[in-house]
Amino acid sequence: MSTSASEEPVARLDNVTVRFGAQEALRNVAASFPPGAVGLLGPNGAGKSTLLKVLLGFVKPSAGRMDVLGLDVAKDPQRVRARLGYMPESDGHIPGMNAVSFVAYCAQLAGLPRSDAMQRAHEVLYYVGLGEARYRNTETYSTGMKQRIKLAQALVHDPDLLFLDEPTNGLDP
């Protein structure tokens, strides 16, 4: 049976182990993630966030190898991250910045020119439902609004793949 490019996994882990001192966060994890929406379920401390951070190249595994979108994470973490959008579990807003400035700043960090970054920031903030509140300082936002800002910064550079860590925390049904 032949496999087309669209059926190729977007991410693979091959016997990945991550240790923090004597504590193993991941042990010999082998997984393959197909295109589309995939969720990781498990109790707190199961290693879900660690798995995402390993795939992003933020955490170096003790053993094993990973690839994302056909790129070896260990050899080319910056190219991997350039193609990904990442919404972290914890807030990373900059005090004193409004949402549009923060999201535009994130777009510039992702490589967009300043004028394009600002335009995309406005567009994506409307997309996530924060268009009317985009000039308010982020520290005045509710938890749910802060989640939307994190989603906006993950989307602003039009990534090929999104990693969302605890994306529904604080969101109303």
Image: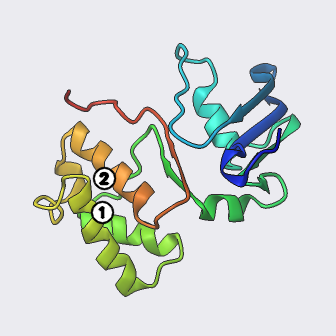
Q: Is residue 75 left or right of residue 130?
A: right
- Amino acid at the residue labelled 2: Ile
Q: Earlier in the sequence, mark 2 or mark 1?
A: 1
From the viewer's side, name the closer residue of 163 and 141: 163
Q: CA distance from mark 2 to mark 1?
A: 9 Å
Please give the name of the residue rendered at 52% of the width and 70% of the height, measured from the top-left corner. 110
Res. 78 mark: none
Label 2: few (<14), some (14–19) or many (≥20) C-alpha neighbours in 10 Å: many
In percent of width and height, residue 50 lies at: 64, 33
Q: Is residue 26 left or right of residue 82?
A: right
Please give the name of the residue rendered at 19% of the width and 47% of the height, measured from the top-left corner. 141
In the image, farthest residue toward the right: 63
- Amino acid at the residue labelled 1: Val
In percent of width and height, residue 106 lies at: 43, 66
| Helix, strand or loop at mark 2 | helix
In the image, farthest residue toward the top: 43
- Can residue 10 be seen here? The reply is no
In percent of width and height, residue 5 lies at: 72, 53
From the viewer's perspective, is residue 127 above or below residue 44?
below
Please identify, in this view, whether the residue under mark 2 or under mark 1 is nearer the observer.
Answer: 1
From the viewer's perspective, is residue 126 above or below residue 146?
below
Label 1: few (<14), some (14–19) or many (≥20) C-alpha neighbours in 10 Å: many
Tell me which colouring the rendered structure shows. rainbow
> Which of the 4 quarters of the picture holds residue 83?
bottom right
In percent of width and height, residue 58 lies at: 68, 48
Res. 149 mark: 2
| Helix, strand or loop at mark 1 | helix
Q: Is residue 151 left or right of residue 21?
A: left
From the viewer's perspective, is residue 30 above or below residue 130?
above
Q: Quadrant of the N terminus?
A: top right
Label 1 belongs to which residue?
124
Please give the name of the residue rendered at 40% of the width and 84% of the height, measured from the top-left corner. 114
